[in-house]
Amino acid sequence: MAANSNSNTNSQHLPIFKGVNYHFWNLKIKTLFKSQELWDLVENGFLDPDEGHAQRLRENRKNDSKALFLIQQALDNDILPRISAAETSHEAWEFLQQEYMGDKKVIAVKLQTLHRDFETLSMKNNESVQDYMSRVSYIVNLMKSYGEIVSDEIVVAKVLRSLTNKFEHVVAAIEESKDLSDYSFDELMSSLLAHEDRLNGSHEKIEEKVFQVKEEASFSREKSAIFSGRGRGRGGFCGRGRGRGRGRGQFTETRQPNNDM
């Protein structure tokens, strides 16, 4: 029952190949075969055992039929007829490889291009760690889908020498404190993301301080303008007061002749 349940679950969650991005489908379905202990059978096929090993023959045929069924289930209906003549999982797999991956010469050319892309990779200014690591992973996964073996050690070394200058200190710390031969890609990404968060946090604090200084400077200018305005008002009032004083002097002078009369 458990085996049937696992088989049904796998069938329901199979990656479906629809004619594009074969290398990604290839990578996913290959992992599935390995999890079911079927990959060796799919990749290399099997030979009928010597006489007296009927049980082994039945087991091989049973597993091969299971692998072939998984391949059929993982193909879109428009693609499925192309492997209809295949009687074993190995035959079906080889046909798909030839049709969508290309022969060895084609694969060699594609790998050469991917190697060049990998070597010229470098982090762009203002590019996030997440975006850069995604670009690296994309090329590495393509290389692996064509059968290339790319270790974490190679990828980690490439990333460390292709980061921007703002990661210079963390790169030096990693190279001094870590054994790069045993340092995984995921560990490196975690360290870089943490460093990026600290950098962004410091930058935000600096921006807050700059904003605060600007606000205080603006408030000081407004306050200075208010007090300056009050000073001009008092000066005007004094001027009017002096004007009234001259007016009273003139009024006294006009009343004196009336008293003489």
Image (spheres, rainbow, N blue to C red):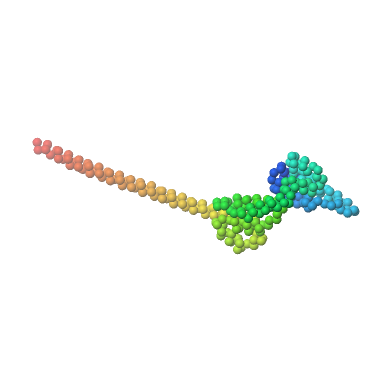
Q: Nearer the viewer, residue 125 or 231?
A: 125
Q: Residue furthest right?
A: 52
Side (left or right) of 106 relative to 205: right
Placement of the C terminus among the 4 image quadrants? top left
Side (left or right) of 122 relative to 72: left
Q: Nearer the viewer, residue 49 or 11?
A: 49
Does residue 10 appear in the picture of this structure?
A: no
Does residue 148 appear in the picture of this structure?
A: yes
Q: Residue drawn 70% across and 56% down?
A: 149
Q: Residue drawn 49% across and 51% down?
A: 207
Q: x%, y% of residue 243?
A: 22, 42
Q: Residue furthest bottom?
A: 176
Q: Nearer the viewer, residue 138 or 184?
A: 138
- Count of marks placed on residues: 0
Q: Nearer the viewer, residue 67 or 10?
A: 67
Q: x%, y% of residue 240?
A: 25, 42
Q: x%, y% of residue 164?
A: 56, 55
Side (left or right) of 176 relative to 35: left
Q: Residue drawn 71% across and 50% down?
A: 106
Q: Residue drawn 27% across and 44% down?
A: 236
Q: x%, y% of residue 210?
A: 46, 52
